[in-house]
C-alpha cells in the first residue's frame, strides 16, 4: 500500500507541538506513503469561525482551500477539530463563494489521522508509551467526525497498556477562544477532566487533538501533576517525549 | 449581570453540585431508554420531519387548530406578546369571579410571568407540579425545563415544607410527596380555574396533550369549572398520529421513560354527556417573539419540544446550573432561545456559554443543531457590533492577515519560538498579559516550540 498523502499539520501543531507532525510523517512513511507538506499552509480559520468572526474565518478558509486544492491525494489531519472544520464547516462557510466547489473537493479528500490509520490497517506495532495511557475523546472528532472508539482501538491494537477514563467523552473545557471568553467555566470543566484523569491511574493522557491536550497539559502542569499529555500520533509512532 | 458573572458565582456551589448530580442521573436514564429502543433513530428522524414541516407552515396549521377548538366549544385567543396573554387571562378570571387558580407545570407561563400578573389582582395561584410547588413556596425560579428543583436537595425541601406549610420535618422523598399531595388536594377541589401548558396540539382535531408524572395536569384540566391552556404558537402538530411520534421521543429523551405516567389528552370543554370536565375551555396561543425567530437564522430552534436532554448532557449547564443563564430557558436550548426570544441585556453573552462540544446535538430528539445556531448568533452579534467579545476583532483580523500570507506565517512561527524561549520556564508560560491572562489564571501554557513544523520540514525534507 502506498501513494501520496498531503499533510495538513494544523496551526497548533506547527507552532506548539511540531513533534506531533513529525510523528505523523514517520507513521505514514513507515507504512509506505509518500508524505507531502503543502508549504504555504497556515491555519484553517477555526478560531475565528468559532468566535463568530466570519470575515476573518472566511479569509483563512479560502487561503487553506486554495493551498490544499492545488494538491492531490488524501489530506491527513492530525486533529479531529480541524478535520471537522475542513470536512463540514469550511464548505458551509464558503457556500455561494467562488471557492465553494474547491472547498467541497478538499472536504472530500480530508481524513483525520486516526481514521486514516484505522481504515487502511496501518501497522501500529511500533508504538511505545512510558506508562499506562488513558484516552480523552475530543469533542469534534467524536461528534463531528464520528470517531467513536477509533483511538482506543488503535491504542489497544498497538499493545500499549491502556486504562479507562471516566467521562472520556466529556469536553475538557477548551473550546477555542471559549477558554479565554469564559475562563471560569472553562477552568471548572478542566478541573473535572483533570480529576477524572488522575483517578484513572493513567500516567499519560492521550488524545487526537493538540488543542485539548494543551489545555489538559497546562492544567496538569499547574497542579504539579506527574501525569503527562501526549498526542496519539506520538504514542503510535513510538516517539512519545 | 452577564452569564459569565452569574456562572462564576454558581461554580462549585451546593446548588450547582445538586444540579450536576441530577443532570447526570437524568442523562443516564435517557441513554438507557434510547439503547433499549431500536426505533429511536428512525423516530427522531420522523419527529424532526414533523417539526420542520409544521414550522414551515405554521399559518396553515394554527388556523385549523383554532377552528377545531372552537367547533368543540372552546375559545381561542391569539396573544402577540406576554402582556396580551396575561391581560386576557386576568380579565377572564375577573369576569368569572375566580378566586383560586391551580396550575400544572408550564414553561410558557413562566416565560410570560402569568402568576405574578394574576397575583396583582389578589387572586390565589397555586402551582401543583411538585417541583413548581416547591419553587413557588421558596420564591425561587425553575433551574431546569422539566425538573425545576434540580438544584435543591431533599433536605432543603424538608426544611421548606416545615417552615412554609407547617409540615413535620422529613427528608424522605415519599413522605415529602405525600405532604404536598395532601396539601394540594383540598386546593384542587376548591379551585375555580385550572391553567395548563400544552406539550402538543393537533390541528386536525383540536386535541391537546399534556404529559406529567404526577397526574396534577389531569386534575387542573378537569376539576375546576374553567380550563385555560397556554401554548407557544410553535407547539402545533398536524395530526393526533403525529403526536404519537412526538410522545415516543419526548419521554425517553426527558426522563428515560417509555411514556410519562400520565399522558393527558384534552379536546374542548365538557360535552353534555360527559361525567365531568370544565364548563369553559380557553386556549391562549402565544407569539411573544416567535414570529420574529421564525424569520431568522435561528428558526429551527422553535422545533424544540422541551425535553431537557440538552441540559442534562451539557458540561456547561452541569457546572453552572440553570440560574446562571438568567432567563426562563437554560442550558444549550436557553443559550439560543433566551437571546432571540427574551431580548435583554443579561443575555448578550449566552451564545458564548458553550464550548461547542456538540453533546446537545447528539441527544436532541429533534436533532436540532444547537452548536450551529450558537455560532450563527455569535456571527450575528459580531456583525451588529453587539458582541461582548469585540476585543477579539482586531487580534483576529491581524491573525487572519498573517495566516493568509505564508511568509508572514513562517515569520510569526519563528517569533513565537523566540517568545517561548524568552518567556517560558521549563517549557511553560505561567503568566500572560491582557485577555490572554484569562488562560494563565488557572492553567500554564505550553511554550511555543523553538522549531516550528515548517522549520523542521524545511530542514529535513526541503521545501
Image (spheres, rainbow, N blue to C red):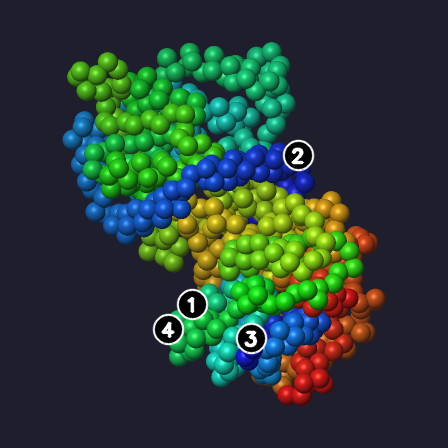
Residue B370 appears anywhere in the view: yes
Q: In the rendered structure, are the residues bearing label 1 and label 2 in contact, judged by CB atoms less than 8 Å apart?
A: no
Q: B35 or B312, which lies in front?
A: B35
The image quarter containing residue A161 is: bottom right
Q: State the residue in front, A16 or B11.
A: A16
Mark 1, residue position: A92
Dot 3: chain letter: A
Residue at 63% across, 46% down: A167
Residue carrying label 2: B14
Q: Secondary structure at mark 3?
A: loop
Q: At x 42% / y 13%, what residue is drawn?
A: B185
Task: Report how far apart the C-alphas of labels 3 and 4 lie in the structure.
Answer: 38 Å
Q: Which mark is residue A1?
A: 3
- Disc 3 versus disc 1: distance between alpha carbons? 33 Å
> Which badge, 3 or 4, comes first in the chain's sequence?
3
Q: Which mark is residue A96?
A: 4
Q: Position of residue B30 (x, y in %)?
A: 49, 38
On screen, residue A177 above or below B65? below
**Residue furthest bottom in the image:** B462
Amino acid at each position: 500500500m502506498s501513494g501520496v498523502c498531503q499533510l495538513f499539520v494544523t496551526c497548533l501543531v506547527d507552532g506548539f507541538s511540531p513533534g506531533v507532525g513529525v510523528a505523523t510523517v514517520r507513521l505514514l512513511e513507515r507504512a509506505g506513503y509518500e508524505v507531502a507538506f503543502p508549504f504555504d499552509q497556515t491555519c484553517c480559520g477555526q478560531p475565528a469561525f468559532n468566535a463568530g468572526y466570519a470575515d476573518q474565518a472566511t479569509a483563512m478558509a479560502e487561503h487553506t482551500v486554495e493551498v490544499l486544492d492545488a494538491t492531490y491525494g488524501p489530506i491527513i489531519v492530525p486533529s479531529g477539530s480541524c478535520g471537522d472544520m475542513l470536512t463540514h464547516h469550511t464548505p458551509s462557510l464558503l457556500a455561494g463563494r467562488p471557492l465553494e466547489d474547491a472547498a467541497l473537493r478538499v472536504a472530500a479528500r480530508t481524513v483525520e489521522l486516526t481514521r486514516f490509520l484505522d481504515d487502511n490497517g496501518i501497522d501500529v506495532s511500533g508504538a511505545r508509551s512510558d506508562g499506562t495511557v488513558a484516552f480523552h475523546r475530543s469533542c469534534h472528532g467524536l461528534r463531528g467526525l464520528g470517531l467513536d472508539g477509533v483511538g482506543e482501538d488503535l491504542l489497544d491494537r498497538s499493545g500499549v497498556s491502556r486504562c479507562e477514563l471516566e467521562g472520556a467523552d466529556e469536553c475538557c473545557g477548551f473550546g477555542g477562544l471559549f477558554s479565554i471568553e469564559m475562563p471560569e467555566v472553562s477552568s471548572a470543566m478542566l478541573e473535572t477532566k483533570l480529576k477524572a484523569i488522575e483517578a484513572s491511574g493513567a500516567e499519560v493522557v492521550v488524545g487526537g487533538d493538540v488543542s485539548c491536550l494543551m489545555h489538559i497539559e497546562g492544567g496538569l502542569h499547574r497542579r504539579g501533576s506527574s501525569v503527562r499529555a501526549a498526542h496519539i500520533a506520538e504514542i503510535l509512532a513510538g516517539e512519545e517525549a | 449581570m452577564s452569564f459569565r458573572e452569574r456562572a462564576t458565582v454558581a461554580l462549585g456551589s451546593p446548588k450547582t453540585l445538586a444540579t450536576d448530580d441530577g443532570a447526570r442521573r437524568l442523562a443516564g436514564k435517557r441513554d438507557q431508554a434510547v439503547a433499549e429502543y431500536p426505533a429511536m433513530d428512525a423516530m427522531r428522524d420522523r419527529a424532526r420531519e414533523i417539526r420542520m414541516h409544521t414550522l414551515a407552515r405554521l399559518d396553515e396549521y394554527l388556523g385549523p387548530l383554532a377552528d377545531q377548538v372552537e367547533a368543540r366549544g372552546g375559545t381561542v385567543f391569539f396573544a402577540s406578546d406576554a402582556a396580551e396573554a396575561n391581560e386576557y387571562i386576568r380579565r377572564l378570571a375577573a369576569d368569572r369571579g375566580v378566586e383560586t387558580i391551580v396550575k400544572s407545570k408550564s414553561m410558557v407561563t413562566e416565560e410570560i410571568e402569568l402568576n405574578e400578573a394574576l397575583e396583582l389582582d389578589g387572586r390565589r395561584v397555586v402551582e401543583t407540579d411538585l417541583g413548581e410547588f416547591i419553587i413557588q413556596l421558596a420564591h425561587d425560579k425553575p433551574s431546569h425545563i422539566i425538573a425545576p428543583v434540580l438544584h435543591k436537595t431533599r433536605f432543603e425541601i424538608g426544611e421548606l415544607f416545615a417552615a412554609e406549610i407547617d409540615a413535620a420535618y422529613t427528608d424522605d422523598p415519599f413522605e415529602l410527596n405525600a405532604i404536598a399531595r395532601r396539601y394540594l388536594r383540598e386546593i384542587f377541589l376548591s379551585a375555580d380555574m385550572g391553567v395548563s401548558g400544552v406539550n402538543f396540539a393537533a390541528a386536525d382535531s383540536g386535541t391537546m396533550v399534556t404529559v406529567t408524572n404526577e397526574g396534577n395536569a389531569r386534575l387542573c384540566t378537569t376539576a375546576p369549572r374553567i380550563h385555560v391552556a397556554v401554548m407557544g404558537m410553535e407547539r402545533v402538530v398536524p395530526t393526533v398520529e403525529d403526536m404519537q411520534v412526538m410522545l415516543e421521543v419526548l419521554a425517553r429523551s426527558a426522563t428515560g421513560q417509555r411514556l410519562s405516567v400520565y399522558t393527558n389528552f384534552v379536546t374542548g370543554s365538557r360535552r353534555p354527556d360527559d361525567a365531568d370536565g370544565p364548563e369553559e375551555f380557553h386556549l391562549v396561543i402565544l407569539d411573544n417573539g416567535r414570529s420574529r425567530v421564525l424569520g431568522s437564522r435561528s428558526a429551527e430552534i422553535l422545533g424544540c419540544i422541551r425535553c431537557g436532554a440538552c441540559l442534562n448532557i451539557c458540561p456547561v449547564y452541569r457546572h453552572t446550573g440553570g440560574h446562571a443563564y438568567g432567563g426562563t430557558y437554560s442550558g444549550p436550548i436557553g443559550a439560543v432561545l433566551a437571546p432571540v426570544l427574551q431580548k435583554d441585556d443579561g443575555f448578550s453573552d449566552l451564545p458564548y456559554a458553550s464550548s461547542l462540544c456538540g453533546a446537545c446535538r447528539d441527544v436532541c430528539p429533534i436533532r436540532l443543531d444547537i452548536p450551529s445556531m450558537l455560532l450563527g448568533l455569535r456571527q450575528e452579534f459580531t456583525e451588529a457590533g453587539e458582541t461582548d467579545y469585540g476585543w477579539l476583532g482586531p487580534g483576529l483580523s491581524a491573525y487572519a492577515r498573517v495566516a493568509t500570507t505564508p511568509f508572514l506565517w513562517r515569520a510569526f512561527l519563528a517569533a513565537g519560538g523566540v517568545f517561548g524561549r524568552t518567556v517560558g520556564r521549563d517549557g511553560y508560560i505561567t503568566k500572560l498579559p491582557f485577555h490572554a491572562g484569562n488562560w494563565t489564571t488557572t492553567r500554564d501554557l505550553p511554550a511555543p516550540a523553538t522549531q516550528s513544523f515548517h522549520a523542521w520540514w524545511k530542514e529535513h525534507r526541503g521545501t
